Amino acid sequence: SFPTRRSSDLPALTRESFEKSYAPKVYGLRYLDKLAYEDDAEFLLFSSTSALFGSPGQANYSASNSVLDALAPQWTAQGHRRARSIQWGPWAEVGMAVQKNTLQRAKAMGVGALSTVHGMSIMGSLLSSSDCVVGAVPVKWSKYLRSAYQEVPPFLVDLEAEVKRDAPNKGAAGGEGQMSYAGLTAEERLQAVRTSLRDMARQVVDNRSEER
C-alpha cells in the first residue's frame, strides 16, 4: 500500500507535501486509465470522507480523493465501463485510523467507525447500485456540526436544518443516532444495519446532488 496521507494545513502546503498524497491516487488512476480493459469493466475507487466534508490539516488528501469522486461519474457516463467511488470514513479494525490511533478523536467529534462486516456490505451494495459516489460513515450529525465547525459551511446548511427538525423525534426514540436491535436475530440485526447504512449513504449522495 502507498503512503497516501500526509497532514498539512493549506497555508503551509508545499508541492512536496501535496504530491505525497496526490501522486499515488491520482497519477496511479491516470495510468490505470491507459490500460486495456474489457467493455463494461467494473472499477471501485477508494475515496475518503475528507472529500465529503473535509478534514482539518488534510487539504492535500482531500484534493486527491476529490479527483476520484469526479472521475467515477465521468468514466461511467462514457459508457465503456462502470466506476464507483466510496468516500470511506474510519474503519474500526483496519486502516489508517487504527494505525494512527485517531478513532477516539473521531468518536469525540461524532464520527463513528465501520466494522469490517459493515464495510464489506456497503461495498457489495454499491457494486449493484446505480450510484457513482457514496459516502460511507456513521455520523451523529448534531454532535459533528457542533464540534467540527465554528460556523456550519454552506454545503451542510440543509443537513443542519434537517438535524434540528428531526431532533425531537430522535429524543423521543431514546437518544440521538441510536437504534434498538433488542429482540432481533443476528441475521436481522445485520440486515437492519445494512439498511440504515444504505439510507445514510443515499442521503449523503442526495445532498451533494442538490448542491450541484
Image: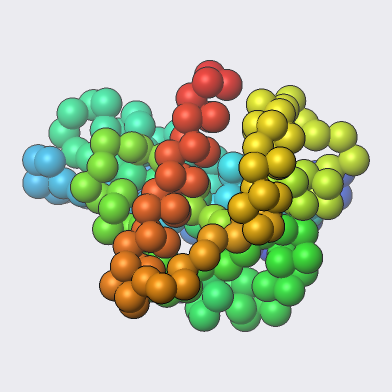
Judge left or right: residue 124 versus residue 154: left
Q: How is the image coloured?
A: rainbow
Q: Position of residue 155 (x, y in %)?
A: 67, 28
Splitting the image into 4 quarters, where does residue 153 fall?
A: top right
In the rendered image of this protein, does residue 164 appear above or below residue 121? above
Splitting the image into 4 quarters, where does residue 178 fall?
A: bottom right
Judge left or right: residue 105 versus residue 163: right
Judge left or right: residue 156 versus residue 70: right
Is residue 13 in sight in this rendering? no
For this orientation, the residue located farthest to the right is 150
**Residue ID at (33%, 75%):** 185
Q: Position of residue 81 (x, y in %)?
A: 19, 38
For this orientation, the residue located farthest to the left is 39
**Residue ID at (23%, 26%):** 78
Is residue 211 in sight in this rendering? yes
Number of numbered callouts drawn: 0
In the rendered image of this protein, does residue 190 appear above or below residue 132? below
Q: Position of residue 31 (x, y in %)?
A: 34, 49
**Residue ID at (55%, 75%):** 92
Q: Position of residue 8 (x, y in %)?
A: 78, 55
Q: Nearer the viewer, residue 58 or 25?
A: 58
Q: Nearer the viewer, residue 161 or 9?
A: 161
**Residue ID at (40%, 36%):** 71
